[in-house]
Image (cartoon, coloured by chain):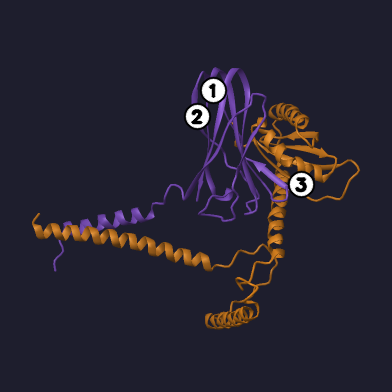
Chain colours: A orange, B purple
Amino acid sequence: LSLRARVQVSGAAVIGVLVGAGLVLALEARAHRGTAEEPPASNQPNEPEVSAPPASRLDDRRLAALEAEMRELKQAKVHDSELAPAALPAPSPQSTLEQRNESVMAFHRKMEGEIASHRSEPRDERWATAKERTFSSQLAGVAAKITPSFSVVGVDCRTYTCVAELRWPNQEEAHASLRELLSSSVEIGCARRISLPDQPPAGDGYRASMLIDCSNSN
Amino acid sequence: MKISSAAKRAFLAGAAIGVIGASVQPALAWSRTVSNMTIVPHNGSTVNVMFPSDGATSGTPNGNATTQIYGDYYWGGAGGTFTMNLQACGICYNLACGSCGVPTNVSHTGTSGHSDDPVNLWTGSQSIWDYFWLTASLSSVSGSPTVYLMGFGVGGF
């Protein structure tokens, strides 16, 4: 190739790299902008649909809201300049607590669904019988070495999953033993999930189900 | 200006390289070695190693954004056989729920050696208020191996 042709080829290659990279970055930025502006999916199945206002009206409302917020911040700064180091609105402790509890409630609901799936799982008699015996013994061993302790009411196995019914004197002791129960039950060799929802006090103590999922175990 | 076919090919090749180069993601956005240098007891007692449960969902070390965990240990002493049990667990902030991934159980024989085993991920409630920890314990011990846990390597996005 002549010098001119070489320069042309090199230049084309460099431009190509820049164009390709720019295209990808532009597409990523566009996709990111699109997801960032999407409203979160609603979990309410019967929530009434609300039509979105036109963009200009939306912009006007946002602008008005921002101006109002600025005025409030200025006033707060004038009144509390000595006391408040930053006059920005703090997240509400109440809303934070609600979000925390919602995530726990979501876990409880998920566990209920998983236990319902377990109940409908067909029973592999040979596997289930062997695992019920093994897991009952292993959980009894865990109960003997951790404090607060618990008792094993029963273990029900099917084909890939088991549910162990455990009992504590009360809910507080169940909460107190949860971490050690999970740490010390490694010998089971399967994934374990447990939910300890609020329950009205019962005469025979506090009961909860541990799901033992062996579907991904060897 | 006339553009040669070689220049066109160079442009297309360059564009392809640019697309691939810009699309490749880094292997991990963050990683942390959580040190906990201790001898793992023979009696089945568990060594618990806490992992920081920072609030962010990506970009900084936190349980929900974790994609890889490795347990790092070595053994020496008089030798023997043992099974190392490693697992990763998550628990809700108010102790009302918790879970552990499938444990990793690896058997070893000999007077000395080193291992760095992958550990299945924890699954908490997926909320940013979960707490996470890792455990190491021994089972099926014979002889007198001394097993030193170094810690866990954790990484994610």
Q: Position of residue A212 (x, y in %)?
A: 69, 37
Disc 1 to disc 3, how far (Cα)?
37 Å
**Which residue is denoted by mark 2 in the rendering?**
B115
Q: Which quadrant of the rendered structure holds the C terminus of chain A?
A: top right
Say what secondary structure mark 2 lies in: strand
Q: Are marks 2 and 1 in contact (CB under 8 Å)?
A: yes
Residue plotted at (70% across, 26% down): A126
The residue marked by circle 1 belongs to what chain?
B
Q: Position of residue B149 (x, y in %)?
A: 56, 31
Disc 2 to disc 3, how far (Cα)?
36 Å
**Which residue is denoted by mark 1 in the rendering?**
B108
The residue marked by circle 3 belongs to what chain?
A
Query: Which amino acid type is marked by label 3?
Result: Leu
Location of residue B13 (image quadrant): bottom left
Q: Are marks 2 and 3 in contact (CB under 8 Å)?
A: no
**Which residue is denoted by mark 3 in the rendering?**
A196
